[in-house]
Amino acid sequence: MDYYGPMVLSHRRFRPFALAWLLAAGLLPAALAQPAAPQDMVPAPPPEVEDAEHPLDDNETALTAELFYELLMSEMSASNGDAATGYALMLDAARRSNDPRLYRRASELALQSRSAEAALIAIHAWNAAYPESREANRYLLYVLVTLNRVNESAEPLAKEVARATTREKLSTIRALPQLYARASNKAAAARVVAQALQAELKHPALGSAAWTTIGRMRLTAGDKAGALEAARSALELDHTDDGAAMLAVQLLDEGSKDAEALLLPYLAATPLPEVRMAYARQLLESQRLADAQVQIDAVTRERPDASEPWLIQASLKLQSGDLAGADTALEQFTKLLEQVPPSEARTRALNQAWLMHAQVAEKRGDYAQAEAWLERIDGGVQTLSTQMRRASLLARQGKLSQARALIRAMPADSAEEERLKWQAEAQLLRDAGDYQQAYEMQGKAVALAPQDNDLAYDLAMLAEKAGRLQEAERLLRAIIARKPDHHHALNALGYLLADRGERLSEARTLITRALEHAPDDPFITDSLGWVEFRLGNRERALSLLEQAFKTQPDAEIAAHLGEVLWSMKRRERALEIWREGQRLNGDNETLRETLKRLGVTL
């Protein structure tokens, strides 16, 4: 059973001659013969169920002149925009004829006039006349939810679940979060649904779906702990359940650290590529690029004809320094898109590919080729992202003033676009090593959105680079005051103190707090390793930094790991790590400064 499908017309009808005359005269709309459900209305039951609800056949139903006139006037009123009058006449006809089709039509006319309360009167009358009618019960359920009378919906919901076959129950259970999405009291909705599904929780074919639905509704209500418990119960019953696995990914996105462990048995089986993709996006968000790479590799093997995984593959390859791999992935991505009919979405996707191709060429130092790729973007339309890439190309060729002029010449139709322009200029200056001016440009962006923690965080990082250490500390502490779980700010402040060798105990506390909110972030693990090194705990530092570098090979982590190894007289291993870091990003400032300070030439 699909809760949101079209209404099903009973094959029974009024006396043929009367109905045919009304239709032929254009006075009785087809809606009476084939009533249309309100948007998102639950459908009528299958014909065999509906037959039981329409016991009056053609020989038993007489369309009297009075009833005929009432139906005619009802439909004419509705056709002329007076649905309320049409409803009243139709409900009166339904009560006098006791025909369930007229009760249904009265309910629809009430809903058409946006009077859910009036519809409820008709539906209650319908349910009273036909207490075993599943169709009437479904209408009642729909309208009660629409009216936000969630607690009252418990009884018709329980009846619907109890009356459905096992196959119908499965689709019904899965549709409940959508049905109750309109309810304002999410906690009450979750409670009502959980109560209605109690009998299904241990059913071998339904239990996992029931727990998943309960989990989704608990999550919507803000009950993360309850949602996590529901996801765990669902996956214990069936570790291959795609819906339960997706719920675990949603919980991971909401910060539930224990949700990831629930996914492992699912991922070890035959996971749905869409679930893998959702999980990979969470890994990317957590900067766990190596783990994300494993999932994307699997998706591209399992579904090579899906385009999006190839774009993410290209991004991962680009970030890891594998430029040839990035090219290959982009070629596959564009090849697949060329098979898709032209559309705005296709154009946007191709633009992303051309931009990334330009980045790859820029990394190779082939600026002419990079410009050629940019020329392909949307027929040369001067979008901000395109111009930012062009500005980057100019800056890399030593034409910083031209690059800044290019950004400033871009029109800005809103405060957001103006902010993006200041950010773009700040990035150009940062890449050029002019941290003081970059700090000033970023400050202009922050002034346009002073409560934006991410903008303030970037400003703090530039303040640190510009030598404004007290200002950087002030900005970071302000972010933490506004958002105590901002793990990036916690980590940055802890690292700032550790790198200066100041207040190391506080630094470790800050970084530990950051790691509690993002336990798998390799860069926070790197910070903790660095503060342990500053505290003199070399073995502990080495363990943490090796873990971070294994999770995310990165030039800055390589700089720290190499220095710890160097201090422990493990010189060959240190050189090996530094060379790997140089291969990943030879321009990394931390790596270059470390090698210079230690007098090491690779």
Image: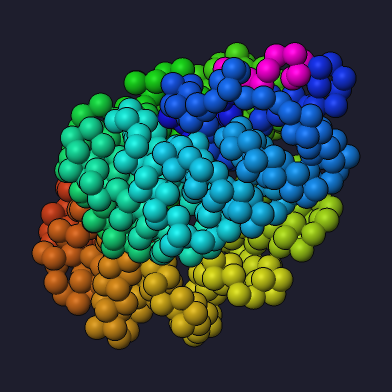
Residue 264's quadrant in the figure? top left
Image point (61%, 53%), residue name:
121
Residue 294 placement, left or right of 378:
left
Residue 429 placement, left or right of 289:
right
Where is residue 344 drawn, in percent x and y?
71, 30
Residue 16 inside the magenta-drawn segment: yes
Question: Which of 321 and 165 lies nearest the eye of the viewer?
Answer: 165
Residue 214 inside the magenta-drawn segment: no
Q: Is residue 332 above or below residue 158?
A: above
Question: Which of 318 and 166 lies nearest the eye of the viewer?
Answer: 166
Question: Which of 478 and 398 lies nearest the eye of the viewer?
Answer: 478
Image point (76%, 52%), residue name:
407
**Quadrant location, the N terminus:** top left
Where is residue 133 drawn, in percent x and y?
46, 37
Where is residue 541 drawn, in percent x and y?
18, 65
Question: Which of 275 and 114 lies nearest the eye of the viewer?
Answer: 114
Total marks placed: 0
Image point (45%, 60%), residue name:
152
Q: Can see residue 293?
A: no
Residue 24's quadrant in the figure? top right
Image point (45%, 55%), residue name:
153
Residue 291's quadrant in the figure? top left
Give the colour scheme shown. rainbow
Residue 460 placement, left or right of 274:
right
Q: Is residue 147 above or below residue 9?
A: below
Q: Which residues are magenta?
A: 10-20
Where is residue 265 drawn, in percent x and y?
18, 38
Q: Can see residue 269?
A: yes
